[in-house]
Image (cartoon, helix red, strand yellow):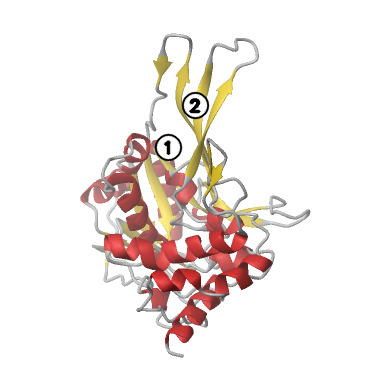
Amino acid sequence: MGYQLTKTKAEQMFQKLSVTCDIFAPKLMEGEGCFSDTDIIRYGKVHSLDEIVWDKKSDYSFKEALLAINETLFYFTEDTTTVPKGPKKDILIFLRACDLHAVKRLDEIYLKNGFEDFYYARVREKAKFILMGCKETCKSGFCVSMGTNRAENYDAYLKVESDTVLLDVKCECMEQMLREAADGEEAVVCDVTPDYVTENQEKVTLPKQLSNESFGKDIWKEYGDRCIGCGRCNFVCPTCTCFTMQDIFYKDNPKAGERRRVWASCQVDGYTDMAGGLSFRKTQGERMRFKVMHKIYDYEKRFGYPMCVGCGRCDDVCPEYISYSNCINRLAKEENE
């Protein structure tokens, strides 16, 4: 159901919700960019609508609100293990349509891929998603090509227009949360339709005839010669799901510690190293090939649709100006030659 509120009233409701929920949204973090004296738009807890960056795509995705960059799985001593408690509060995440499609990809990997990830599941069941509209396309995104420019499975949609807030609520529990936050005051009921882009500057043609022969193309060596293996493309990607494990032993008691899982990158040297000196993807070209083919070929063969949602963040962040979208277009073009 759609509602129209004054921004003042919406802000009051937001303040009340922030007491009972952890609210994550893209916010400007001044001076915290990768380079000195640069800012970054990244997800963090917010306590006001004015903290949210509405007019620019975030540099990093919502993913770290569901899947911590560094998460303790359990604490151990010589003879005991203790699993830390999960989140107590509900979680509200503001995100755009392409990112909401990425949630579906994360759910496939962590909940429906033959087993359920306990740690992801307990955070996921607390999470509700509030859609942010896109009035204009971002520069590098190609969500229209990937069919992720629209999303219907949001719990609520929220749009701020000057002193007015438009809200479309689909989830009954979200309705209840908002009624409680409204403190008995009725909002104006109206039709609210989310803003979606219908055309991007960047357009991508997905290759439809990829095969095992595609893994041997010269294009991978070309891109591999340029890639420096920094892994930044993986960390900004809303659908990359790999992690590694670390056992931390405390200095004051080396027989106690904790096991953590930490985001990992398939582009970083050593990612595929195994005991016995084995390593499956030794060159950057092989790693680039794995990443691209996993996003548009391997995942689709398993789940029926591409893993990539076309957010374009990997193109934005690459220090070597390697364009993932251009790579896909080249693969499609080579199919037709």
Q: Is 313 or 149 nearer to us in this picture? A: 313
Q: Amino acid at mark 2?
A: Arg
Q: Which residue is found at the position 73% from the left and 57% from the top?
A: 38
Q: Earlier in the sequence, mark 2 or mark 1?
A: 1
**Mark 1, secondary structure of its residue:** helix
Q: Quadrant of the N terminus?
A: bottom left
Q: Residues within 10 Å of mark 1 (few under 14, many from 20)?
A: few
- Left or right relative to 274: residue 283: right
Residue under numbered circle 1: 19
Q: Is residue 125 above or below residue 308?
A: above
Foreground: 320 or 279? Answer: 279
Whether residue 308 can be seen here: no
> How many labels sit on residues?
2
Q: Residue at x 29, y 60 (%)?
A: 302
Q: Residue at x 48, y 66 (%)?
A: 292
- Secondary structure, mark 2, is strand
Q: Is residue 282 above or below residue 55?
A: above
Foreground: disc 2 or disc 1: 2
Task: Using the numbered discs, state the Cα–Cα distance from disc 2 to disc 1 in whole angstroms.
Answer: 31 Å
Relative to 190, 298 lies left or right: right
Q: Is residue 69 visible?
A: yes
On the image, the x and y values in percent for residue 239 come to: 43, 56
Q: Is residue 77 left or right of residue 114?
A: right
Q: Amino acid at mark 1?
A: Val
Q: Which mark is residue 259?
A: 2
- Relative image position of residue 217 (x, y in whole percent): 51, 74
